[in-house]
Amino acid sequence: MSNTYGEFPAARPRRLRTTPAMRRLVAETRLHPAELILPAFVREGATTPVPISAMPGVVQHTRDSLRKAAVEAARAGVGGIMLFGVPEDEKKDAIGSPGTDPDGILQVAIRDVISEVGDELVVMSDLCLDEHTDHGHCGVLDADGRVDNDATLERYAEMGRVQAAAGAHVVGASGMMDGQVARIRQALDGAGYQDVSILAYTAKYASAFYGPFREAVGSSLKGDRKTYQQDPANFRESMRELALDLAEGADMVMVKPALPYLDVLSKVAESVDVPVAAYQISGEYAMVEAAAANGWIDRERAIMETLTSVRRAGASMILTYWATEVARQL
């Protein structure tokens, strides 16, 4: 069938781009505040918020400023908040004891946020040891300095119990240990927390873009996490991890980082019937902020374009440090 009548095109897609109202009417992908999740850091002992140099505009919160940020996010319509605790250095140890201390900073922060916003926000907590260990790895080390998968699972089980006891609605299983979802689910159910959901970090890649996050959580890491986070070259491995996480009882799954792995995100979203999250990580945030600060890009347009691309690729939820700002604009 011809696309022209005589010399003139019969199909003119530009007709649907003529005005802002027309473009809005026919937009295929939309962002909504309820789909956004705000990652937030709280630093034990902080009396004023501590700026994160590599992430302009993001801070390590005090307990009071975290409460305020949670209220602001809820009022803006943000869907959830993901909490990361930064314990005092002297409290860190080889097994990440602050992560399972009922009075550890993350558990205290969960209780603080729940007391402020209740069920207005879905309160999520990072279930991983890296912020709490003196070596900075996501698990317990064996005698040879390698991460001991099964010993780490027992620490994760206890973390799940104390985070649920503090009131977390969702625990974010982010350590990339084999069998972590099943062990955490078993621990939660055994302690009577059947209603607490697990967000599995299913495809978490060993990415260069995590750099600013190390500062954000005061990481003590020496070396890298390539023996447990995924190789950026691999895709099929992600689908295998996805099948395992779903079989183990994951309620939601995640791809992290977001922008460098939109192809993985798209395939995961096509393959499952559970909510799919993507984490627009610290390095993605820092790149946009740095380029905008130099006048090289339009900051607001770049933020919206990146988030829209993640949503278009199939994410039903996006963790982003711009969550509250974008929610207000939407």
Image (cartoon, helix red, strand yellow):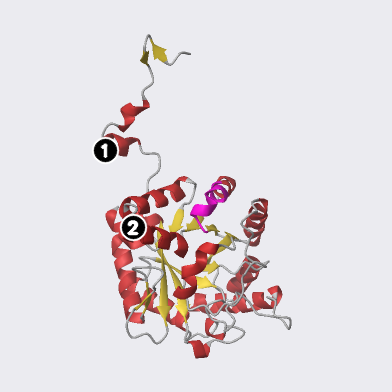
Q: Is residue 107 left or right of residue 322?
A: right
Disc 2 is placed on an element classified as helix
**Secondary structure under the numbered disc 1 in the rendered image:** helix
- Residue type pointed to by label 1: Pro
Q: Is residue 67 left or right of residue 248?
A: left
Predominant secondary structure, magenta span: helix
Q: Which residues are magenta?
A: 257-266
Location of residue 63 in the rendering, given as x and y in whole percent from the top left corner = 36, 81
Q: Nearer the viewer, mark 1 or mark 2?
A: 2
Name of the residue lying farthest toward the right: 144
Residue 65 located left or right of residue 177 = left
Between 275 and 186, which is closer to the camera in this rendering? 275
The residue carrying mark 2 is 292
The numbered mark at residue 20 is 1
Q: Quadrant of residue 287?
A: bottom left
**Residue at image coords 50%, 55%:** 258
Label 1 – label 2 distance at C-alpha: 24 Å
Q: Is residue 169 visible?
A: no
Q: Nearer the viewer, residue 246 or 221?
A: 221
Task: Let me know if residue 292 appears in the view.
Answer: yes
